[in-house]
Image (cartoon, rainbow, N blue to C red):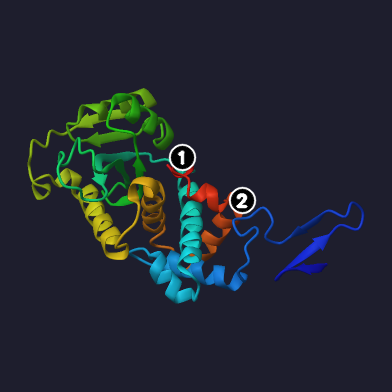
Amino acid sequence: MFKVGSHKTFQCKNCRHQTSLIAGTLFQNTKLPLTVWFLAVYLISQAKTGLSALALKLYLGVSYPTAWLIQHKLMEAMSERETKYTLGGQVQVDDAYFGGELSGGKAGRGSENKVPFVAALSLDEEGHPLRIKLTPVSGFSNKAIADWAKANLTPGCAVLSDGLACFGAVIEAGCQHQAIIVSGRKPKDVPEFLWANTILGNLKTSLGGAYHTFDFAKYAARYLAAFAYRFNRRFQLDTLPKRLLVAAIAIGPRSDAWLRSAEASC
C-alpha cells in the first residue's frame, strides 16, 4: 500500500495491478477528501426542497464549479437508481411542463419554451402515494407515451389519466387505462387527481425555491429524479445518506465531460 496524491493505493504483489478504495465508483479520480463528499451526500439527501450548487459551495468551502460537479454527480446517482423501479397497482399520470420563461410563444401544452415531462404516481389501497416518477419525454405523442410506459410501468397496472389522448398508448405496455375528462376544470374540482396536482405543486415550489437559475432544458432528468428520489424515501430519512452513498458507489465513474453533455443526461 502507498499513497498517490491524497488517497491510498493498493498494489497486488503478483501482477502489480494498482487500485484504490474509490476505483470504479462515482468518486474515482477525485482530488477532494472523502469527508467532503460524505458531507455533500448528507446535505443533498436531507434537503427537503433540494440544495443548489451555490448553497453547497458555501457549506463545503469549495469553488462553485466543484460544488456544481458534486451536486450533479450525486443527482446522477439518484437518477440512475430511480430508473430501476417501476410503478404498479393504481397509477395516476399527468402531462407537465417546466422551464425558463421566454416572451412570446404558446403557453401550457405545446409550449416551445418548456420541457415536457410525465408526472406519475402509484397509490396504496387507501389512496395515498407510494412512489412517484417524473420523466422528461420528447413530447406527448402516442409513441413517446408507449415507450415511457414500457420503461416505467409494471404490466397489468391500472392507469388513470385526464383526457389527453396519447395516454391511451399505455395499453401497448400491457396496462389498463381509464380517462377522466377534465375539460378546463380547476384542480380543486377534480379530486381524482388530488395527489398528482399536490406533487406537481410541491415540485414547482421546490425547484423555484432552491434553484434561482439552472439549465432545466439540459439537465431536466437529474433535477426531476432528485426530487423523486427524496420523495420516494421520505419515510427513511435516517438511512437516506447511507443509501445515496451506496448508489454513488454502484453507478461507477462519471466524467465531468459526460455530466455536462446534454445527450448523456437527457
Identify the mark at residue 252; answer none if there is no mark.
2
Vertical relation: 84 (above or below) 230: above
What residue is drawn where x is 36% and y is 55%?
227
Question: Could you tell me which quadrant the C terminus lies in?
Answer: top left
Residue found farthest to the front: 103
Mark 2 residue type: Gly
Density class for disc 1 (Cα within 10 Å; few <14, some 14-19, many ≥20) is few
Mark 1 residue type: Glu
Number of numbered callouts drawn: 2
Is 126 positioned to the left or the right of 149 in the image? left
Is 193 positioned to the left or the right of 76 in the image? left
Is residue 237 visible in the rendered image? The answer is no
Image location (x, y in percent) of residue 27 = 61, 60
Q: Quadrant of residue 111?
A: top left
Q: Nearer the viewer, residue 215 or 153?
A: 215
Is 254 positioned to the left or the right of 263 in the image? right
What residue is drawn where x is 59% and y is 73%?
35
Image location (x, y in percent) of residue 234 = 38, 61
